Image (tube, rainbow, N blue to C red):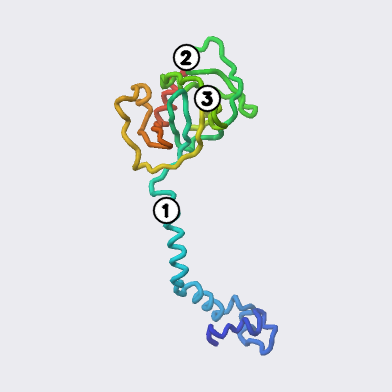
């Protein structure tokens, strides 16, 4: 019996319709029959229609155009007057600004104190002091994104919390577009910067997270 006949359509997969297929006495159900299996294989192996290939070709081209090869995801934020970014995978969450409980006899301004994050006490640190950034002029927040927030990041099994003055959110950019750090950037900041990329007509410093959190940990010892 040829596959084009589709015998299972005429007599049912259990052979309840007459005439009953003699093969069902042996295989019980059509799915166990070589005729049924071959029909399924022919369906999967058939040539794709040109219109189908063209349609999916256009979809893939559009997707590729939106996310170029080599694109990486970062979170863009501002501390003082500087726009910076860290890999998005480091961020556990972003929370509203909460009270920071200062510690007596702290040895460094980098350690701001302790904060309560969902019932857990976490160290709150200052990247502004670590990187020796200059204060930005005080401005009234123009939008919800321009409000001060606390960033919670996880690195090598440790969690850090640090305040930012403004957050843009997640941004994708092509790593091939990363520019070298200009000599005009302050040495303290350039030390922690892997490169510069443009976003919204601003120059954003992609931070070296390995060096940044290593230095941060050493500074608190």
Q: Are marks 1 and 2 in contact (CB under 8 Å)?
A: no
Of 15 and 68, nearer the camera is: 68
Task: Measuring from the top left, give residue 187's x and y in whole percent.
Answer: 33, 22
The mark nearer the N terminus, 2 or 3, is: 2
Residue ranking furthest to the top: 105
Residue 110 lies left or right of residue 17; in this view the side is left
Q: Residue tagged by mark 2?
A: 108
Residue in view at x 62 percent, y 27 percent: 120
Q: Residue tagged by mark 3?
A: 163
Of 72 and 50, nearer the camera is: 50
Q: Are marks 2 and 3 in contact (CB under 8 Å)?
A: no
Residue in view at x 48 percent, y 15 percent: 109
Q: Establish if 153 lies above or below 53.
A: above
Query: Nearer the viewer's eye, disc 2 or disc 3?
Result: 3
Query: Nearer the viewer's eye, disc 1 or disc 2?
Result: 1
From mark 2 to mark 3, how far is it between C-alphas? 16 Å
Task: Measuring from the top left, give residue 101's x and y in whole percent.
Answer: 59, 17
Q: Which mark is residue 64?
A: 1
Could you classify mark 2 by the number of other residues whose Cα lies within 10 Å: few (under 14), some (14-19), or many (20 or more)? few
Task: Measuring from the top left, give residue 124's x and y in whole percent.
Answer: 54, 22
Task: Measuring from the top left, give residue 46's x and y in whole percent.
Answer: 47, 75
Could you classify mark 1 by the number of other residues whose Cα lies within 10 Å: few (under 14), some (14-19), or many (20 or more)? few
- Dot 1 falls on a residue whose secondary structure is helix
The mark nearer the N terminus, 1 or 3, is: 1
- Dot 2 falls on a residue whose secondary structure is loop
Could you classify mark 3 by the number of other residues whose Cα lies within 10 Å: few (under 14), some (14-19), or many (20 or more)? many
Residue 90 lies left or right of residue 16; in this view the side is left
- Dot 3 falls on a residue whose secondary structure is strand
């Amino acid at each position: 019996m040829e596959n084009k006949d589709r015998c299972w359509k005429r007599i049912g997969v259990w052979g309840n319709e007459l005439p009953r297929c003699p093969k069902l006495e042996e295989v019980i159900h059509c799915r166990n029959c070589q005729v049924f299996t071959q029909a399924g294989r022919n369906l999967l192996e058939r040539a794709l229609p040109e219109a189908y290939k063209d349609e999916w070709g256009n979809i893939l081209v559009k997707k590729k155009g939106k996310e170029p090869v080599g694109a990486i995801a970062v979170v863009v934020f501002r501390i003082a007057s500087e726009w910076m970014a860290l890999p998005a995978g480091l961020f556990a969450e972003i929370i509203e600004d909460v009270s920071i409980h200062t510690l007596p006899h702290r040895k460094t301004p980098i350690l701001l104190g302790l904060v309560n994050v969902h019932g857990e006490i976490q160290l709150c640190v200052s990247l502004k002091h670590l990187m020796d950034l200059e204060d930005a002029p005080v401005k009234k927040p123009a939008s919800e994104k321009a409000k001060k927030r606390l960033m919670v990041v996880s690195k090598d099994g440790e969690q850090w919390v640090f305040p930012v003055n403004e957050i843009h959110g997640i941004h994708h950019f092509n790593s091939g577009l990363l520019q070298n750090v200009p000599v005009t950037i302050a040495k303290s900041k350039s030390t922690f910067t892997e490169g510069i990329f443009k976003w919204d007509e601003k120059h954003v410093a992609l931070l070296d997270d390995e060096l940044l959190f290593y230095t941060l940990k050493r500074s608190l010892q």
